[in-house]
Amino acid sequence: MQWVLFGVVFCGLYGVNGNRYADDPAVQRFQEYIRINTTTGGDLTPAVEFWTRLAAEQDVPINVYEYTKGYPIIVLKWAGLDSSLNSIQLNSHVDVVPADESEGWTYPPFGGVLTENGRIYGRGTQDMKSVTIQYYEALSRIKANNITLLRDVYMTIMPDEEVGGEDGMIPFLQSKEFSALNVGLELDEGAPSPIPIIPLFYQDKVVWQIKVDCYGEAAHGSTFPATNSTATGKCRNVIDALLKFREEQYIISTRATIFDAGVYTSVNLNRLNGGTANNIIPSVVSLTFDIRLGTRVNEDAFQAQLEQWIAEAGENITLTYISKNPQSPATVVSLSNPYWRAINQAARSLKVPIIPIVPPGSTDARHVRLAGVPAFGISPMANTPLLLHAVDEYLPASTFLKGINIYEQIITKLANIPSSDTSPDPSVYIVKTAL
């Protein structure tokens, strides 16, 4: 996942004996999954083998598709009574961001260690291997309890969410294999919350990443050219323009609620490169900015403004779009949406507060909504510190197990929505918010 929500809040579970969870089969499967190093761009064969084995244990069909070599997309089908109805897609991603024990991890990042105080440590415990196992455990319980599902349910596991989905979700959505799933609603990842609520993402901010190269003449460090003729001077002008806009947006963000990060556009200068020696004025300096568009921003107008800032910064400056996602619509969060009603019913029966929000970042769900399919992001991790991508990422075993119960109810409600309650065209449950 490519964003941070709320901030890190410490929520201890001291006094809880981790041994009480050690023999739980769901916990053991979660630990085993964490121990598979699935860092983005690495060999995902062991993960495919893991899911092939688990599918066989539940006697459910599994397919693996590759649109780019080395990037497998895993699909498990849990059949319902009527495959002509729109299905429910439970999406997750297998890839995790890099982690190394030398960064200061208390336990090996791919160790899946269960501690005495009931925490499970490892890369992916929050983002998002827990959710994938929770899907599987919830569906296994539904099957074991002979609960009938009206609609087909698919678990889909993507290989590259952490780097944008170019080899995973994006080509999958364009494939005949995805069309055959006949998806009515996609569930995707949410985020932990340090307070007793579960955030539900109904829209994502899209990612624009740009590289700006500023060119000037190289010269000896003792010379003294005009500032605006140098690569550094031109880049300073670019930085000044974008950071001025950033400050304006930052002020807006301080007035926004935690429930709607879509009201502002974030801008961060994440890389600055240039120079060959300490006594040479560089001929080129490069800047890389990460921008997350506000959900109401008009793309064409913002692009025109961005390019105007670059033009005004000086001559011989190039702008390259590393990533430029189109604005993604929002999923309707009102009683007119039967999928939202079903989730609400599950939340009420569980006495779990599920709150719709727009997060500051993005998930694969942004691509799904753009393809005309409504999507909600939810990770059942209330009262949990946000440690996505952090050193010592962990999830309490109690939170993990409670999440299985939550998904069991949500999946059962969603997969049993009567055909008369839903439109065969899922796009009626999404709405454009950009100007």
Image (tube, helix red, strand yellow):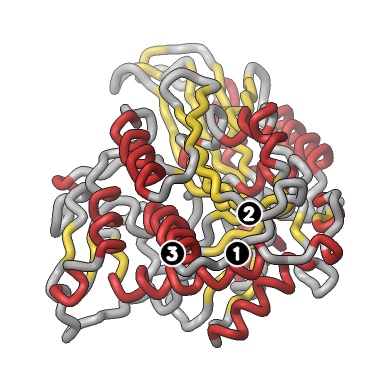
The reply to whether residue 161 is visible in this rendering is: no
Residue 208 image position (x, y, % from top left):
63, 39
Residue 97 image position (x, y, % from top left):
36, 43
Q: What's the distance in space between the residues labelled 2 and 1, CA to CA?
A: 7 Å
Vertical placement of residue 420 versus 123, above or below? below
Q: What's the distance in space between the residues labelled 3 and 1, CA to CA?
A: 10 Å
Judge by depth and name the residue closer to the eye, 425 or 358. 425
Please name the amino acid that badge 3 sits on.
Ala
Classify residue 271 as left or right of residue 43: right
Please name the amino acid that badge 2 sits on.
Gly
Residue 297 image position (x, y, % from top left):
78, 50
Q: Residue at x 29, y 48 (%)?
A: 33
Secondary element at tag 2: loop
Secondary element at tag 3: helix
The residue that label 1 is drawn on is: 148
Secondary element at tag 1: loop
Q: Residue at x 31, y 66 (%)?
A: 395
Badges 3 and 1: C-beta atoms under 8 Å apart?
Answer: no
First in sequence: mark 2 vs mark 1: 2
Vertical placement of residue 410 versus 90, above or below? below
The residue that label 3 is drawn on is: 144
* Number of other residues with Cα within 10 Å of mark 2, as a class: few under 14, some 14 to 19, many 20 or more: some
Classify residue 193 as left or right of residue 327: left
Residue 102 image position (x, y, % from top left):
14, 45
Q: How many marks?
A: 3
First in sequence: mark 2 vs mark 3: 2
Classify residue 111 as left or right of residue 303: left
The residue that label 2 is drawn on is: 80
